[in-house]
Image: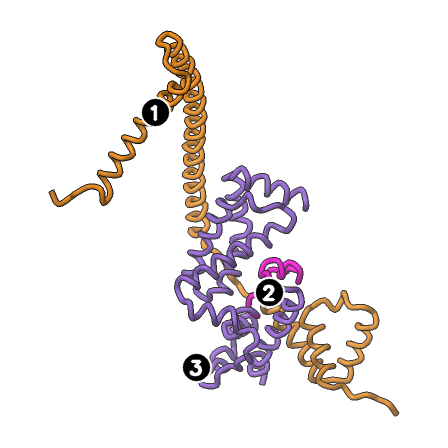
Chain colours: A purple, B orange
Amino acid sequence: MVDERTEIARGLRRRDPDLLDRLIEQYQHRLLRYLLSLTRNRATAEDLFQETWIRVLERGHQYDGKHEFSTWLFSVSRHLVIDFFRRKQPASLDALLDDEDKPMAPPASEEPSAFDRVAHRELSERVATGLDHVPYEYREALVLRFQEGMSLDEIAVVTGAPLGTVKSRVYRGLSALEPWMKGIQA
Amino acid sequence: MTDKRPDNDDHARARQMLALGDTGQLSAADQTWLERHLGACEGCRAFAQDATDMVRALRSIPVAADRSLVAATQMRVRQRARELRQREERMWLVAVSCVAVTLTAVVTNLACWRGFGWLVERTHVSGAAWPLAFVGIFIVPALATSVLLLAKGTHLADHSR
């Protein structure tokens, strides 16, 4: 595993195009899923997907191989997402970054009857819908933890948040999703 | 009887343990405590089941990158890599040129200095004057050029005429 990381770090320093092709193939779904979870918009996520790999090419020498490549990759893409929202929607960025301590909004009752809409769908689709309503910080933690299978320490590296905060986000994220589950099950 | 009923802190603690999904990494005491709490608390048992379902659902949300997106990204990355390589090559050329210019300047200065020394010997100019003349000859063209450029592109130029 360490050898693989060293190999990647060496290849990135050389800007090896074949290595980059391979990495793009390897991480395509995970990276896109992460970007979608942050942006909630496919077109934006795809733009940022490309930007992320360009940034990986340009800043590849900064990857030192100490962490998993995916941890560094997600960290790079996260910064791009923040830059994107800072440029496009300063107000929304505040909402993205500061909503952690606000009370979690329950599913809005006047929403186009989410429960009815998804009553007969698969559980994954229901949770995906619920994810849209989970505050950004929690959503990101949930995606990294349960979709990407990262350890809490790795999430702390990607997000730059203390470990305790990461734990809290995962817990509160699941708690934020729970009303959706219960509503659907009721 | 000192049987303690679970309070809000107990529920929060149990749910946090469950949510973090690392119950296998709990200490034996915590594991025992959690099992006992779940045995007594229907709400937390339901949360445990919900959490399991949610995690399973999260893992199965299908998101796939299009083949065209991957191909376009690979093409852009290769194109950018080419640009960076060309830029690096240009920078390398500039660096080599700088080194060559510096070396040439050193050699030229040395040659001129010696030439001036030889001239001084032949013309018997005073020892203090010839270094000033040497510096002047080297600086005057640069100064003149600077003044000309300044006058052409700044407030020194009278564009009204």
Q: Mark 3 points at which residue?
A: A112
Q: Name which quarter of the figure residue B136 lies in.
A: top left
At mark 1, the secondary structure is: helix
* Residues behind callouts 2 and 3 on a single chain: no
Whole-number angstrom distance, CA of label 3 to CA of label 1:
85 Å
Q: Magenta span covers which residues?
A: A138-161
Instruction: Name which residue type carries label 1.
Output: Gly
Instruction: Name which residue type carries label 3.
Output: Pro
* Subunit of label 3: A
Image coordinates for residue B35, horizontal then vertical, percent: 79, 77
The residue shown at (78%, 82%) is B39
Q: Name the residue under label 2.
A: B59
Q: Name which quarter of the figure residue A170 lies in.
A: bottom right
* Subunit of label 1: B
Image coordinates for residue A143, horizontal then vertical, percent: 57, 65
At mark 3, the secondary structure is: loop
Q: Mark 1 points at which residue?
A: B136
At mark 2, the secondary structure is: helix
| Image position of B131 with respect to A33: above or below | above
In the orientation shown, which residue stands out farthest toward the front? B126
Viewer-proximal residue among B39 and B33: B33
Q: Is residue A91 left or right of residue A136?
A: left
Viewer-proximal residue among B101 and A108: B101
